[in-house]
Image (spheres, helix red, strand yellow):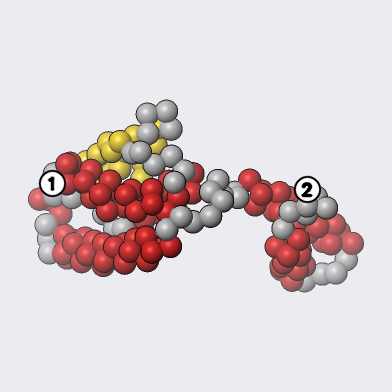
Amino acid sequence: MNRLLPFPLISLCLLAMWLWLSQSLALGPILLGSLFALIGGWLLRLLQSDADRVRNPGAIIRLSGLVLIDVIRSNIAVASIILGGQRNRITSGFVDIPLDLRSRQGLAVLACIVTSTPGTLWVNFDRETGVVQLHVLDLVDENEWIERIKGRYERLLLEIFE
């Protein structure tokens, strides 16, 4: 049964949502919704974690605090660039950062952190070399960005996921 319905509650919710959105209890929407619910459950099974458990819950709290501070700080910096009329004085660019992190979930969290912080954007990750390429709106010092990503985020993500 687990192979057919790996997440029965989620599949049931998907079916209910489909029927609610289609506003019909006819056979067609029920069959189509059931198909989507089955496929949705199977796709979620592919996203299951590599890690058996989170290794350091305290690191999650520290990482959340750092991300919150960095998002606020980045919002202020980007707002001052845009509102302060400094747009023509900024130098944007790309930074290649070698990562030790290989966990899919850890990389996904890092991508979310980087893209949720204004002024940065995750561009590319080469799984073979472990190098992530970021675009930075106001690139002053590449080494500062490498140290920030590796020292602030990657270090804690390694504690959490590996």
Q: Is residue 14 left or right of residue 156?
A: right
Q: Is residue 97 left or right of residue 141?
A: right
- Report which residue position mark 2 lands on: 3
The image position of residue 79, as x and y in percent, is 21, 65
Sequence-wise first label, 2 or 1: 2
Q: Nearer the viewer, residue 70 or 22?
A: 70
Circle on res. 140: 1
Q: Which is nearer the eye, 101 or 23?
A: 101
The amino acid pointed to by label 2 is: Arg
Judging depth in this view, the residue of 145 and 34 nearest the camera is: 145
Expressed as whole percent of the image width and height from the top left, the position of residue 116 reads 36, 58
Amino acid type, residue under disc 1 in the picture: Val
Tell me where residue 13 appears, x and y as whole percent.
72, 67
Residue at the spot x=36%, y=45% of the render?
A: 122
Residue 79 visible, this orientation: no
| Residue situated furthest front in the rendering | 55
| Quarter residue 86 falls in | bottom left
Q: Nearer the viewer, mark 2 or mark 1?
A: 2
Q: Identify the secondary structure beneath mark 2.
A: loop
Q: Do tag 2 and tag 1 residues touch (Cβ < 8 Å)?
A: no
